[in-house]
Image: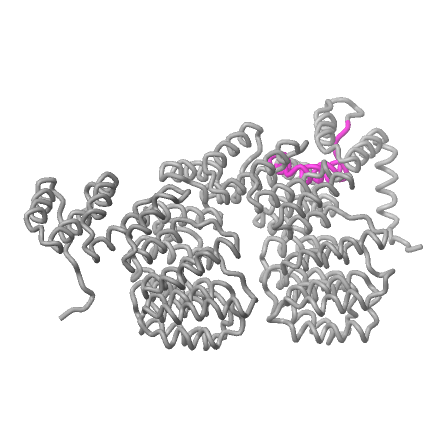
Amino acid sequence: MRRIPCSHKSVAAITKTLSKHPRLIELNCQLASLSRSCYYKDVLHLFDQIHSSPSHLPHSIKPDQYTLSTTIAACAHLRDVVSGGELHAYAIRAGLKSHPHVANTLLSFYAKAQDSTSLRKVFEEIDNPDVYSWTTMLSACLKMGQVGYARELFDEMPRRDVAVWNAMITGCMENGCEEIGIGLFREMHCLGVRHDKYSFGSILSACTVELMDFGKQVHSMVIKTGFLSKASVINALITMSFNCKDASSAFLVFEGADALVRDQITFNVMIDGLGSLERVEEALMMWRKMLEACLRPTELTFISLMGSCSNEKIGRQVHAQVIKSGFKGCTSVGNAIITMYSNCGNLREGYMVFACLEEKDLVSWNTMISSYAIGKSGRSAIWTYQEMHRTGIKPDEFTFGSLLVSTESIETVEMIQALVFRYGLISKIEVSNALISAYSKHGEIEQAYQIFHTSQKNLISWNTIISGLLLNGLPIHGLEQFSNLLISELKPNPYSISIILSICANISSLRIGKQVHGYILRHQFFETSLGNALITMYAKCGILDWSLRVFDKMVEKDIVSWNALISAYAQHGEGMKAVHSFKAMQNEGKVKPDCATFTAILSACSHSGLVDEGAQIFNSMVNDYGYIPEVDQMSCMVDLLARAGFLDEAESIINSQEIEAQSNLWWALFSACAAHGNLKLGRIVARFLLEQEKNNPSVYVLLSNIYASVGQWKEAAHVRELMKSIGVKKKRGSSWIRS
């Protein structure tokens, strides 16, 4: 048994305390017992009784360092900053702050309160910090993201054991300082400090694609040192494999581990990793293996399974197993079930699960609000927030972020901004980004830019304002902000580049588009989304050959890639090539056409007069793929038939379709009437359009042209006069080409 060094002086002090205040010892034991039982409010109440006992009596009781430290610890658990501050002041007045028990507990209190200023002050006032003081301070700084200061503390520490090294490495990796974390791991190895399972676990689980080579080196070290028998190391290796999108390696590690080594976490990591790669069936099979291994599923098991379910039928089956396994009352699992139903588009079922939750935490309310926001049910999101407010739960930055996504009017945005100020969350970068996005969406780009200019910025902030400027018809200003981003400390990500390519396509700037393409190649961006954006950009700039070259060089092609190529051919009048691309996509069989695919290919057929091909593709969309034609597809079919002179057939499609005929369908037919000089049908369509768009000069101009094309000059002139009497003016054309 380890002996605790203790001087004769300290023994005498303890004996004196015991003999003088036996009642205080008893009360301190009561405080400790209440604290262990998590009755923290009762701890504060008992301390108040001790502190308020009459001081003039001969045997009055005064709180000592143990009384104070236990009570401060209770404040830390309750996050009671006010009471904790009062106890700190009392410690100073009573001369108890110098006691290690009190000083260290104050450190823990301010660490949990995330008050870095007070934390540093308390630490600096400790004359001789012990191991607990150093480790508490180090861990707190790392949790608050103060890696630089934590590194200074680490270098000053008089004694650093393996636990301290592990804490420092883990903190660096979690804060995105991978280089520092890896450097410490190597330094630890060079100094002869032996790695343990926590060292390997923390470094491996943080390895991503960029650190794959280093991860493999650590994997070799794990094998050499015999740590493959530790479950935590196996779990970290599996996590690393999934971080690198390498399911094969994950399976190799899993299958290579001894059956006795695999624990619940091992299966949970496999299920979560497979779910993240959308390999739902394999995730469900892994769950079955977990049950066969006689391991009981945990909360995380069901949370991971629910997170991977995009099929409501499978989700319902997992939901049933949640109830059978006794997790129905678990709030975190309930939150995951709500998310699953909302992702499947069943908000009603999601709300029923939410309503049945016995205990709703902040995440529950945020999940429901977010579900309504994603489902574009802004009013329901606001109503849910009001219910949350009535229950007394305080919103956070994610609450307001979801509310701002779902706003239906500028007045709602302004109301939410007022609430943000009221709750002191305007400094949260997530909130300022959501406000920038909301104001941009509602056309208030000046207000959006003001928030951007005065707020703390991350890469999402830059992407949001650049996207907002493009949305509000200010592409040149978007390019200027991108230039500012390039000279800042942040680096553009693939999404940033895709926005800029959209701007280049919008203004047909081939010169800037090529520069961006060069930037992509220099920085080795291989994302499919950027290839798709380049195809569109070159097509919009009139360079179809380059669109095809980009498409051919892409390693991975998704449905957006094929849609971009088909649309490029359609824009350039290459209808037959678009049809060939569509058939090539079908023959390849890797991706399934979506609604956007059919809109693009039907548009290509329309512009090239490919009636037979268009009709065949339209029938395939309905019969082979089971899509119900939407307005865009119907508009393309009407345009296709009308351009080819089949005006009666085009009209019959408009009149017979199940969905309500919108003005763009009639416009397609009206344009064809003008092209083919069909006055009878043109007058009928014009009457309908004038009811919908009375002040649109194009209706009058096109109708006048139809009259003129059949030689009815008097009627054509009458339409022009009618246009003048109503006060409708034709807008002048403009050209980008300057003389």
- Reply above or below: 113 against 535: above
At horizontal 54% and vertical 27% (from top left) the residue drawn is: 390
Task: Examine the rendering and report whether any part of residue 581 can be seen.
Answer: yes
Identify the coloring: one colour
The front one of 491 and 164 is: 491
- The image quarter containing residue 469 is bottom left
Name the dominant secondary structure of the magenta segment: helix
Tell me where residue 601 appears, x and y as whole percent: 41, 62
- Reply above or below: 674 against 385: below
At horizontal 67% and vertical 74% (from top left) the residue drawn is: 214
Tell me where residue 85 appears, x and y as whole percent: 61, 38
- Chain part drawn in magenta: 61-85
- Reply above or below: 634 against 47: below
The answer to whether 7 appears left or right of 377 in the picture is right
The answer to whether 556 appears left or right of 547 in the picture is right
At horizontal 50% and vertical 43% (from top left) the residue drawn is: 375
Residue 350 magenta-highlighted: no
Residue 64 magenta-highlighted: yes
